[in-house]
Amino acid sequence: MGGSIGLALRREGVAVCGFDHDAARAEAARELGAVARLAASVEEAVAGADLTVVAVPVGHVADVVIDALDAGATLVTDVGSVKAPVVAEVEEARPALAPRFVGGHPMAGSEQEGLAGASADLFVGATWVLTPTGRTDPRVFAEVRSWVAAFGAEPLAVTPELHDALVAVVSHVPQLAASTLMNVASAGNDEHAVMLRLAAGGFRDMTRIASSHPAIWPDICVANRDAIVGALDRYLDELTRVRSIVAGGERSCSSCWRRRARRAATCPPASRPVRTCSSCGCPSPTARA
Amino acid sequence: MGGSIGLALRREGVAVCGFDHDAARAEAARELGAVARLAASVEEAVAGADLTVVAVPVGHVADVVIDALDAGATLVTDVGSVKAPVVAEVEEARPALAPRFVGGHPMAGSEQEGLAGASADLFVGATWVLTPTGRTDPRVFAEVRSWVAAFGAEPLAVTPELHDALVAVVSHVPQLAASTLMNVASAGNDEHAVMLRLAAGGFRDMTRIASSHPAIWPDICVANRDAIVGALDRYLDELTRVRSIVAGGERSCSSCWRRRARRAATCPPASRPVRTCSSCGCPSPTARA
């Protein structure tokens, strides 16, 4: 992610200075052209910078943002996939400096793709969430917002808490759901395993999700624990309801419920018809009633 | 599915005769070239046929197979995605004729794609499950098997019950899991709905699964109820365990469990290391222990 931002900034003509604790990775970023020069410390990297972007694993974001603010950075954002605990930690630890920081999360690529997948075009057309709070300096927010737009992304401002609830639903829980399903599938015997490898369609999509980089997930599960557990609980409740529909062989309501899912996946919200199923009371028309 | 089989058979030089209760669809199949001529009834269609393929929704397969056997078909197979109840119904209803029938399920395309997606190449490289039983005439099985191979598919013989357990895990439960997740996501407010449409990565895979044709699912959920409920129960158990791992913030075991899922998605069974996690006892090495 940091590599893609570096490339996007340099394409805008910015003299990018980079710092990474891992000297080999820093050098690789320089060779790729994602940074023009390397700094030996956070302090050196942020000195005189118009914009400081913190691109580190989510468990380290708050610490590095605080280091950057302490070093005098005037305008700081990050790209971590969890926002509320990070923003809260920065605002609690440095109330006087926190207005210079606005949290960010580009909904593109992966935190773990590394430099090999870096591209200046990664953010074109992608949503880039920003999470200003009542403490954020409006000029800081406006400045970061214009950088995001310069990368071709669509800035979307929400509260840190809403961001975390949303990504729990659209990213973290789908990942956990797919991984869990893979574990259930692989718990079978060898015949199962052979079949799994040959399976078509939806399962391949699931395995693609499940095989994404596991190293970042413990951090995310810890950082966004409450939102993930809340979304998982809603998922478990709904899945238990589905289980009883299937177990009961309620053909019409199973169809009704599936049509609702299909509509959610394909229709814009405003165009969704809201009626009530006569069999189960769910907010959708019955299929066969 | 029937259209693709017709095209594949005609490419092999077979004079395909088709019958469909829906006269317009029958005519469309003829215009497409999937059948050389149309019959006015099942009886007329199977008269003198070397092979009879039943391609109808899963809830109607047994009835049509029985009709075909009664009409004198000497070699019958089907392409439905649930096998045990269909095979059992045929064997119970027509014990003397059932040896001429072997259940089949090509793991390619969709039952609902219709003629527009028909292709003679649909089955090339795909697994085509056949479900002979102790009552199946071995010559019938061998003949169907050779047709399947002629289509470029890889025949895989398993019991009807194992087939149903496998597809519950690799196809039916993933579909239900994705649809349920979409319902949970769409239950949020309008901000949620906007964000969902902009979300990246895994969620798009989920929505692709969830938006597949809902019309066939009630039939499948009824026909394969027991296997689906069994797999859903295992999924619910495992997901509840994951929920408590996340809620407890057990970083090392969350990682351990995710690595197991990733290995299941990417490694052939024989290459999987089996060790025991020292923290949770699950059969995988710990990541950070």
Image (cartoon, coloured by chain):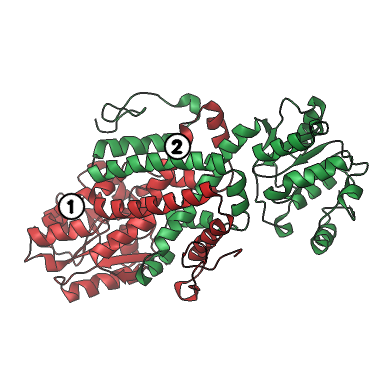
Chain colours: A green, B red
List the single residue furthest toward the left: B96
Across and down, in percent, residue A25 comes to 79, 61
Chain letter of mark 1 equals B
Q: Residue at x 47, y 65 (%)?
A: B281
Task: Look at the numbered discs 1 and 2 and tell me whether their residues touch, using CB distance below 8 Å.
Answer: no
Q: Quadrant of residue B148?
A: bottom left
Quadrant of res B5: bottom left
Where is residue B261? Give x, y as percent: 50, 60
State how far apart marks 1 and 2 are (Cα).
47 Å
Q: Nearer the viewer, residue B3 or B77?
A: B77
Above or below, A8 against A98 in this view is below
The answer to whether B227 appears left or right of A145 in the picture is left
**Residue bearing mark 1:** B39
- Is B89 situated above or below B197? below
Q: Which mark is residue B25?
A: none
| The label number, if any, that marks residue B184 in the structure image | 2
**Residue at 87 percent of width and 39 percent of height:** A73
From the top left corner, tell me how far across and down residue B83 is, in percent: 24, 59
* Image quarter of the N terminus of chain B: bottom left
**Among numbered discs 1 and 2, the one appearing first in the sequence:** 1
Taking the image as shown, residue A38 lies to the left or right of residue A80, namely right
Give the residue type at disc 1: Ala
- Residue A98, relative to residue B284: is it above or below? above
Q: Is residue A204 left or right of residue B94?
A: right
Q: Nearer the viewer, residue B83 or B13?
A: B83
Read off the chain for label 2: B
Residue B212 appears in the picture as rendered: yes
Secondary element under disc 1, as helix, strand or loop, is loop
